[in-house]
Amino acid sequence: MPQLEDDRIPVTLVSGTLGAGKTTLVNNVLRNAGEYDVAVLVNDMGEVNIDAELIAGSADDDVIDLTNGCICCQLQGDLVSEVNRLARERSFDVLLVEASGISDPVPVARTFLGDTADGEDPTAHYRLDTVVSVVDAYGFWKEFDPDAERPAELDAPGRTLADVLVDQVEFCDVLVLNKCDLVPDDELDEMERVVRELQPRATVYRETYADVSPDAVLATGLFDYEEVSRSSGWKRRLREGDGDEGHGGESHEGHDHADHDHAAAHGVTSFLYESDRPFHPGRLDDYLTEWPDGVVRAKGFFRLATRPETVMGLNRAGPSVTAGPIGRWGEGDDRRTRLVFIGRDVPEESVRSALDDCLTTEAELEDAGELSDPFPSE
Ligand SMILES: Nc1nc2c(ncn2[C@@H]2O[C@H](COP(=O)(O)OP(=O)(O)OP(=O)(O)O)[C@@H](O)[C@H]2O)c(=O)[nH]1
């Protein structure tokens, strides 16, 4: 194990949608752990922790299971008390946490950074080291296809699988594109470009049966909260604008201007729509129900003619769309609409012209108070 100055226990958080291959990955890591003494915490939404039972060595006290809730919300307190208890009771090198399939990794990460609701702080014993997302390559496009049938019970409360999947891809250091045996290489190439566009900073491994080496996911030192939060594709695109000039300025490992061009040449789209003119609420609302094929992600801020002081937010992950007020414009804010689109073969020109058609005309703007506004109120 690399010697780090910080002698707290490194934590690897493994997330991924239902059936993506998290348990398979955890078992592989345990099997090949070699010199690492690994403790495991497994979270399952059901009453019985099936995953914990499937993990090698689960009969002994190296595997803790937390059931009947999710560690990103209901079981956050249990997560903290269990990991603290474990650290007090025995010594080990690494903690591997397998989140439930609907977990949002951000609140779990924040818990390990000491942002806990109930007193106990895990940062005395632990430091979050690596966030791993396991992505099911076979099911990937289906989550973003508005016409695909998917069982609603797989969705998280208030969030669809597409939302969960996007959160997991955007917030990770290591991305395991799993089940590659079930997907042709050219599809995998395209998928890899899209996930790299969503989170350019992640190290991507293509795997079958999540066969990663322990060194790829344990004690890597890769996690950096500030960095992962600011480096998601849509935030980068907002910062850098839509032209070429911004991309070379900030060079992240493995992703620069040339990568953008390369991705664009292979059908991966990422563009920024900007406008000074506010949207007509009715026309925009209608357009938001028409999901252009291929959009994996759309996110940003917009202006609405009926609410000049309100920042409106748009958040789309595949077919799931939310749009509503997220705050008030401040003094000196750049009050333009700025929306980022990421996907494969998104018809950029038609999206741009459809959005242009949703902008208010001069005459409509004069009587903006008369327009009906279907968006949620503040
Ligand atoms: N064909 C194929 N099957 C895989 C691969 N990886 C995992 N599986 C299978 O997919 C199923 C789900 O794998 P798990 O590791 O249990 O997935 P999980 O993410 O832990 O699932 P949940 O805990 O239910 O969310 C199992 O039957 C695995 O054997 C792979 O690369 N290819």
Image (cartoon, grey):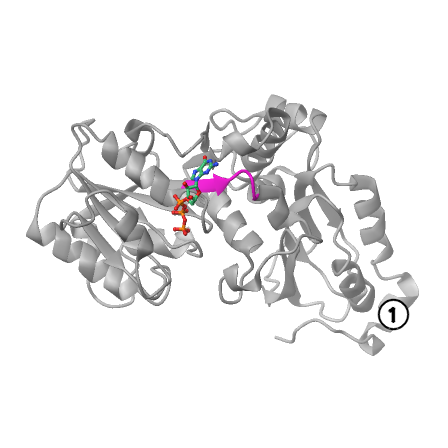
Quadrant in the picture for the N terminus: top left
Badge count: 1
Is residue 146 shown left or right of residue 282? left
Q: How far across and how far down the image is residue 212, in percent? A: 36, 30
Residue 335 lies, with reference to residue 15, above or below; the image says: below
Residue bounds of the magenta highlight: 133-139
Query: Front-most of 210 and 301?
Result: 210
Amino acid under label 1? Glu
Is residue 117 shown left or right of residue 287? left
Q: How far across and how far down the image is residue 285, in percent? A: 76, 65
At 62% from the left and 21% from the top, the residue drawn is 258
Tell me which corner region of the image, top left, top right, bottom left or bottom right, holds residue 284: bottom right
Based on the picture, tell me whether residue 136 belongs to the magenta stretch.
Answer: yes
At 25% from the left and 51% from the top, the residue drawn is 41
At 37% from the left and 30% from the top, the residue drawn is 211
Ligand 1 falls in quadrant: top left
Q: Which residue is mark 1?
A: 366
Quadrant in the picture for the C terminus: bottom right
Q: Dot 1 surroundings within 10 Å: few (below 14), some, or many (20 or more)? A: few
Q: How far across and how far down the image is residue 297, in percent? A: 63, 47
Based on the picture, tell me whether residue 345 belongs to the magenta stretch.
Answer: no
Q: Regarding mark 1 in the picture, which secondary structure is present there?
A: helix
At 29% from the left and 30% from the top, the residue drawn is 214
Q: How far across and how far down the image is residue 31, in percent? A: 24, 33
Query: Front-most of 305 and 349?
Result: 349
Query: Residue 362, can we see it?
Result: yes
Q: Is mark 1 within 8 Å of ligand 1?
A: no
